[in-house]
Image: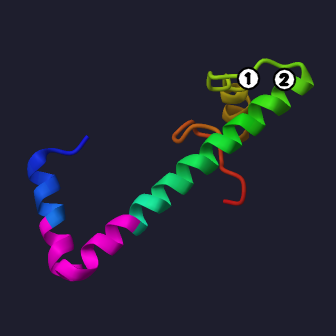
Amino acid sequence: MISATTALLLGGAALLIFGPKRLPEVARSLGRSVSEFKAGADEARETFRQASKQAGEPPSTEAPEPVSGASESTSRIVPPVGDGEPRPGS
């Protein structure tokens, strides 16, 4: 959420940039764009839910867990700096 001071500064800058005649037109256009974006996001969310339901999987709201053993395998690929072993290609 933005503060009142920030909103006033943004409004003043928009008034200076677009002028008093075009500002309402720009605001309407911006409002329509935001509305269309929200509608598209809702449609995509609903499509995902329907696809998950058809696949028999509950929709996940959690982030995937990291791959187990990833840190072990990366430490074997690149040894830590200063371990005394020569680096590949050096």
Q: Are marks 1 and 2 in contact (CB under 8 Å)?
A: yes
Q: Is residue 78 visible?
A: no
Few, some or many C-alpha atoms within 10 Å of disc 1 (few <14, some 14-19, many ≥20)?
Answer: few
> Which residue is label 2 attached to?
53
* x, y percent for residue 34: 46, 55
Quadrant of the rendered image containing residue 76: top right
- What residue appears at the point 71 percent right and 29 percent down from the top-left corner? 70
Q: Is residue 76 above or below residue 38?
A: above
Of 2 and 36, the residue lying toward us: 36
Count of numbered tags? 2
Question: Dot 1 lies on which element?
Answer: loop
Helix, strand or loop for the magenta stretch, by majority: helix
- What residue appears at the point 81 percent right and 30 percent down from the top-left corner? 50
> Which residue is label 1 attached to?
59
- What residue appears at the point 12 percent right and 68 percent down from the top-left corner? 12
* x, y percent for residue 49: 75, 29
* x, y percent for residue 4: 11, 47
Three-letter code, disc 1: Pro
Q: Quadrant of the N terminus?
A: top left
Q: Tell me the magenta residue range.
A: 12-28
